Image: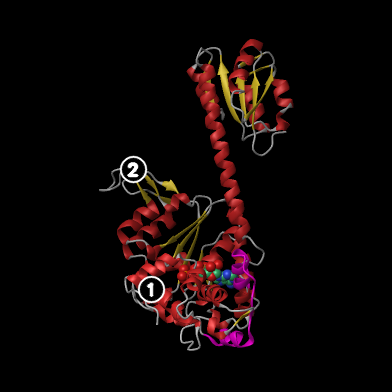
Amino acid sequence: MPDSTSFLIFIVEDNAWYGELLEYRLSQNPDYAVRRFTTAKACLDNLTDKPHLITLDYTLPDGKGDEVLKAIKDKLPEVAVIVISGQEDVRTAIALLRQGAYDYLVKDEETADRLWNAAGNVHQQLLLRRENRRLRQQIGQKYDLQQPILGESPQIQQLSTLIDKAARANISVSISGETGTGKELVAKAIHFRSDRRDGPFVAVNVAAIPRELLESELFGHEKGAFTGAVSRRVGRFEEANKGTLFLDEIAELDLSLQAKLLRVLQEREVSRIGSNTAIPFDARLMVATHRNLLLEVQEGRFREDLYYRLLGLPITLPPLRERGHDVLLLANTFLHDFCHGNSMVVCKISDAAQQLLLQYHFPGNVRELKAVMELAAVLAEGDQIQPQDLSLRGNSQGGLGLAETLAGDDSLKAQTAAIIQRYLDAYKGNIVQVAAKLQIGKSTIYRMLQNNEIRIN
Ligand SMILES: Nc1ncnc2c1ncn2[C@@H]1O[C@H](COP(=O)(O)OP(=O)(O)OP(=O)(O)O)[C@@H](O)[C@H]1O
């Protein structure tokens, strides 16, 4: 039996000398395991070993190529079969290819080389498929947890039931909720629990892509469709084939693209910019927004007909501040994951810090909580997280005041300087400690001091 990394080839050829020649050539690749059979029956009897490639002589003593090909494909549809024939016959070649043969080669002095190339291609495709499967499994494991949406509050329990219902039906899903409440996480959970889990999950943040690029991002374009279209581009709608397309911040889609999206959904086809060819659209659509989409409709910014098409199963995510003690459950999980990932000792959250977390309004919701807890793990002295380690907006006690620093409109450079300055103050100018805490080089701090971007107070 082939293992998961090998590439098993069957050569089916009644001419012993020719079979040996092909075997000799193909065996030159150390990744290939080659076995030779002189009859169709012997080949068919051994298909349980699941070869990846079969080279099939068209005229065997116990069967003609087309019959044997059919028998092979009936038993093992995914195997690549290359038919090798003594004479060229275009009609037979076409018929065999239609029947599912991978290639058709005529015996001449170049056959062994052409077979070598074809086998190389089949092998490459197999490696890509394996890699693809591995990555999918990895992603699947990451998101396909029984309880991917952490929380014990009634709101989150209800949400879990809705996710299961959404996963079972092939209905559109519209998710709303404040920023950072887990809209994308919910969309992924539905995808990975649904029948489409083996297909791709393609996420597009409509608000993050400039209008002039968005159309081609979504629908793709043909080479030369517009200035700058130097090569063909497959759009995200096509990429999501057999999977899920998640359009985040859907309310930001402008009216002309809303019209185009509506057409795609009505006709279930897309065409690339610059092409008249319609490509079937077979993906489940999920959309998300932090806005009230109905209000957008009432104010004329969002098409009503599109709204009803997209609404499907509406899911509203509650803000974190309304999830009661889930805040602490999430805080502990984030702390635990971060400390484990960074080989740090996991600290506890002191009672006072817990109270602060429970009272805080979390405008950035779960995303903010995660960032706050990770930073707290870095800042904590000893084995407990104290209120001063929590960088919450308006927390006068501490967190080095980073929340305010980061909420400003300053450039990245200015924000970096502000963060380092806060740490320098907190560590009383100890550059070695600050560099270690922030995991930056001491030279960065010295350079910034030299440029007067920061100072020792
Ligand atoms: N209930 C939850 N359990 C565990 N992790 C969560 C939960 N909710 C959100 N998260 C985490 O919080 C972060 C933000 O979630 P996500 O990106 O899904 O939010 P969003 O609502 O889509 O945000 P935005 O509106 O900015 O697009 C992610 O790291 C996500 O894994």
The answer to whether residue 214 is above or below residue 131 is below
Numbered label attached to residue 231: 2
Numbered label attached to residue 26: none
C-alpha span from label 1 to label 2? 42 Å
Is residue 41 within the magenta segment? no
**350 vs 448, nearest the viewer:** 448
- The magenta stretch spans which residues? 333-360
At 61% from the left and 31% from the top, the residue drawn is 31
Say what amino acid the circle numbered 2 marks: Ser
Say what amino acid the circle numbered 1 marks: Ala
At 64% from the left and 16% from the top, the residue drawn is 13
Picture coordinates of residue 30 (x, y %)?
61, 28
**122 vs 287, nearest the viewer:** 122
Location of the N terminus (image quadrant): top right
**Residue 434 visible here:** yes
Location of the C terminus (image quadrant): bottom left
